[in-house]
Image (cartoon, rainbow, N blue to C red):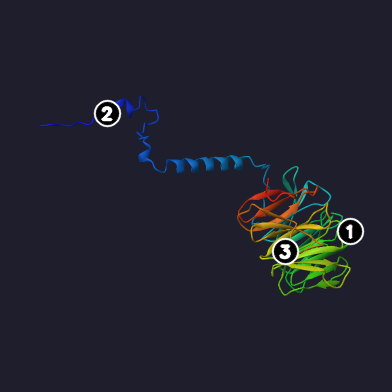
């Protein structure tokens, strides 16, 4: 009779003390692990992504809103002052140097759709779901200086850089005077709502608007009609003018890309920026005009040089 016995060395699987890590037997034969290379590749990719994630230039967070933040803007005169508006109708003024809230007010019933600073920087204008346009004084932030009731819902607002005028976007692009309760001029080119309006920082009488019908329209507030119009493949969510090049503006589009256009020739974009993997929601230029930052639905923030199509 032939008997076979399996035996192994206790030193291979027993711990010397209770504090030692248990020894797990492992077969290193590559035939037994056909997906080892794929697993190691995934681990290396995750490690590289985590290294880039923790290397981001994160300075701090400004907490205090009870609901999501819908609007965020920088002060035109002070680099350390920003304003934010949330879905619950609250507006907060922040000091970035101290990273704390210095003023807060319950501004609207419903969402704060958009905000803008006045040309002097001493006032904030806001629009909300309650169809009100409110003007707030930064020194006395408890009650609005002026309240205007609009006939339709408003989605965007921007102030003229020199004069006491501002533009709103809703059913149409409307130009308002701070001293009047009715719009002094209205532009309409299409039937869909206006998603964003922005004044040019150099040619201050020119403004651009993005509409829900995928169009981008240029207006001059000195004229009675709109100037030019271009229709893209998908809707644009926001736009911003280059502060150093008066003819260049960039739009954030739903097709995961950003497009820079020259207002003198809208037939084709000057540059296409791609790296996001979901819709681009908002963007803003740096004061030098050399770079701009974008925010996307893919939960990423990217910085693009104006002369390159990829983020840095």
Foreground: disc 2 or disc 3: 2
- Position of residue 250 relative to residue 15, above or below, is below
Residue identified by numbered label 1: 162
Separation of marks 2 and 3 at Cα, in angstroms: 76 Å
- Position of residue 64 relative to residue 214, above or below, is above
Q: Earlier in the sequence, mark 2 or mark 1?
A: 2
Residue identified by numbered label 2: 8
In this rendering, would 172 be left or right of 254?
right
Disc marking residue 177: none
In this rendering, would 40 be left or right of 93?
left
Quarter in which the C terminus is drawn: top right
Disc marking residue 108: 3
Residue furthest toward the left? 1
Residue 293 visible, this angle: yes
Q: Residues within 10 Å of mark 3 (few under 14, many from 20)?
A: many
Query: Where's residue 141, x and y in %?
Result: 79, 56
The reply to whether the C-beta atoms of the residues labelled 2 and 3 are less than 8 Å apart is no
Front residue of this view, candidates 187 and 311: 311
- Position of residue 249 relative to residue 62, above or below, is below
Q: Residue 91 lies in what quarter of the image?
A: bottom right
Front residue of this view, candidates 62 and 217: 217
Residue 182 visible, this angle: no
Foreground: disc 2 or disc 1: 2
């Amino acid at each position: 009779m032939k008997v076979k016995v399996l035996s192994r060395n206790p030193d291979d699987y027993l711990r010397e003390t209770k504090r030692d890590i248990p020894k797990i037997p492992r077969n290193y034969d590559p035939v037994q692990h056909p997906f080892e290379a794929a697993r190691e590749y995934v681990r290396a990719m995750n490690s590289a992504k985590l290294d880039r994630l923790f290397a981001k230039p994160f300075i701090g967070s400004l907490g205090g809103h009870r609901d999501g933040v819908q609007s965020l803007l920088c002060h035109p005169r002070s680099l350390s002052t920003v304003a934010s508006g949330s879905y619950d109708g609250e507006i907060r003024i922040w000091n970035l140097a101290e990273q704390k809230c210095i003023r807060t007010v319950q501004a609207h019933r419903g969402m704060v759709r958009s905000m803008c600073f006045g040309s002097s920087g001493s006032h904030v204008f806001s629009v909300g779901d309650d169809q009100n346009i409110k003007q707030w004084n930064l020194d006395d932030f408890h009650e609005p200086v002026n309240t205007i009731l609009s006939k339709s819902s408003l989605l965007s607002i921007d102030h003229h850089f020199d004069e006491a005028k501002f533009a709103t976007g809703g059913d149409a692009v409307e130009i308002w005077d701070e001293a009047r309760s009715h719009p002094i001029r209205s532009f309409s080119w299409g039937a869909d709502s206006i998603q964003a309006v922005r004044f040019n920082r150099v040619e201050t009488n020119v403004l651009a608007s993005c509409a829900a019908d995928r169009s981008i329209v240029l207006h001059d507030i000195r004229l009675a009609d709109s100037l030019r119009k271009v229709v893209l493949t998908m809707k644009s969510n926001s736009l911003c003018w280059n502060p150093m090049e008066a003819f260049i503006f960039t739009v954030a589009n739903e097709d995961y890309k950003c497009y820079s256009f020259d207002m003198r020739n809208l037939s084709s974009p000057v540059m296409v920026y791609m790296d996001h993997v979901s819709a681009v929601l908002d963007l803003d230029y740096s004061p030098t005009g050399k770079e701009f930052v974008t925010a996307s639905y893919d939960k990423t923030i990217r910085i693009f040089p104006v002369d390159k199509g990829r983020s840095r």
